[in-house]
Image (spheres, rainbow, N blue to C red):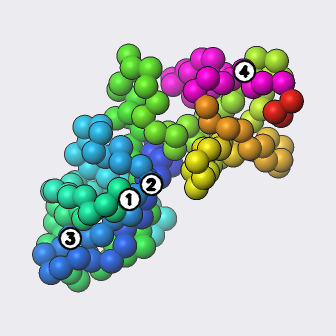
Amino acid sequence: MIKKDDVFKIGIFNKPHGVKGEISFTFTDDIFDRVEAEYLICLLNGILVPFFIEEYRFRSDTTALIKLEGVDTSEKARMFTNVEVYFPKKFVEEEEETEDIPTWNFFIGFKVKDVRYGDLGEIVDVDDSTMNVLFAIEKDGEEILLPAHEEFMVKLDKKKRLLTVDVPEGLL
């Protein structure tokens, strides 16, 4: 069984495209193109279900047409309309030796600790709607917005899911 902690959201399926089962896909992260993965995870009726990718092609910087295995008619593709799409974290975590940050959404669920202030809470969302990406960190019902800048990051422990930061004075 796939757990919510094992995946992170990368987009949403829109409406079917054509009659052969292609689905329009609006994504916030093109990780599925950058990291080797054979499948995507869809949230269907509250259950995370994997679907193998037969093929895909990009339409723009934020949309693609995806053909899933076993979905070969527009009627079957219509069942995926407005379905959230997730990516398995294990494919990203396999690249432990790289220091690159594959995607900001990967950090959702990480605990954040500051070198001076200690525990800041857990990243519950990433706001990338503006030029400056922000981590939404929640602790004791309070929300902190922290700029997601690599220069603030001191240490990243993917196994413990802990991000240690050094936030400039006055920012918190």
CA–CA distance between discs 4 and 2? 27 Å
Residue kind at label 1, given as amino acid type: Thr
Q: Residue furthest front?
A: 131
As drawn, the label of residue 166 is: 4
Q: Residue at 15% of width from left, 56% of height from top?
A: 54
x, y (%) of residue 23? Answer: 26, 70
Q: Earlier in the sequence, mark 4 or mark 2?
A: 2
CA–CA distance between discs 1 and 2? 7 Å
Residue kind at label 4, given as amino acid type: Asp
Residue 166 included in the magenta stretch of the image: yes
Residue 49 visible here: no
Q: Earlier in the sequence, mark 3 or mark 1?
A: 3
Q: Badge 3 is on which residue?
A: 22
Question: Which portion, as a residue range, is magenta?
Answer: 150-169
Residue kind at label 3, given as amino acid type: Glu
Q: Residue at 37% of width from left, 73% of height from top?
A: 14
Q: Earlier in the sequence, mark 3 or mark 4?
A: 3
x, y (%) of residue 32? Answer: 31, 46
Q: Nearer the viewer, mark 3 or mark 1?
A: 1
Q: Badge 2 is on which residue?
A: 28
CA–CA distance between discs 3 and 1? 16 Å
Tell me: residue 157, above or below residue 46: above
Residue 27 appears left or right of 143: left
Q: Earlier in the sequence, mark 1 or mark 4?
A: 1
Categorize mark 3 by other alpha carbons within 10 Å: few (<14), some (14-19), many (20+). many
Q: Residue at 40% of width from left, 29% of height from top?
A: 93
In the structure shown, which secondary structural element does the residue marked by tag 3 occupy?
Answer: strand
